[in-house]
Image (cartoon, rainbow, N blue to C red):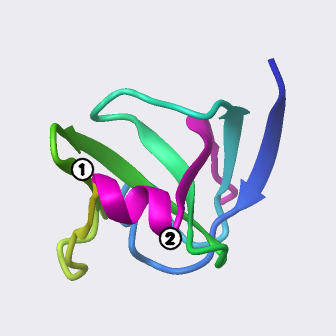
Amino acid sequence: GRYFGLKVKGDSMQPRIIEGDVVIVRCQPDAESGDVLVVQVNGDKATCKRLLKYQSGISLLSFNPSYEPMVYTNEQIEALPVTIIGKVVENRQKY
């Protein structure tokens, strides 16, 4: 498979993934509920979130409880679009 590294900005995934970490992402267009993903919404910047799938759509969750879930219906996933870039398979931190 194809992999790439992405340097994390922001605090939405703290405490597990912090700003400055490099996540290793396996390129894949779909994922399972509970996976940590890199996702692009509406062609904007990529975001790192945990996926929860429902019959009617998805939620993208931050580990940081200060952030509200990003909730999308199946119609919004198609229209915006919400695109899964890949699954986070590793987190590299520097001390």
Residue positioned 33% across, 45% down in the render = 51
Q: Secondary structure at mark 2?
A: loop
Locate residue 88: give its quadrant: top right
Q: Is residue 68 left or right of residue 21?
A: left
Tell me where residue 30 appears, x and y as whole percent: 51, 31
Residue positioned 52% across, 80% down in the render = 10
Above or below 56: residue 41? below
Tell me where residue 49 appears, x and y as whole percent: 41, 57
Q: Are marks 2 and 1 in contact (CB under 8 Å)?
A: no
Q: What's the magenta region?
A: 74-95
> What's under tag 2, amino acid-wise?
Leu
Q: Residue furthest top?
A: 1
Mark 2 to mark 1: distance in Å? Answer: 13 Å
Q: Is residue 77 magenta?
A: yes
> What's under tag 1, amino acid-wise?
Gly
Closer to the camera, 84 or 57?
Answer: 57
Would you name the residue on which mark 1 appears?
57
Would you name the residue on which mark 2 appears?
80
Q: Is residue 11 left or right of residue 22?
A: left
Above or below 84: residue 87? above
Q: Is residue 47 left or right of residue 93?
A: left
Tell me where residue 2 appears, x and y as whole percent: 83, 26
Tell me where residue 93 appears, x and y as whole percent: 64, 52
Q: How many marks?
A: 2
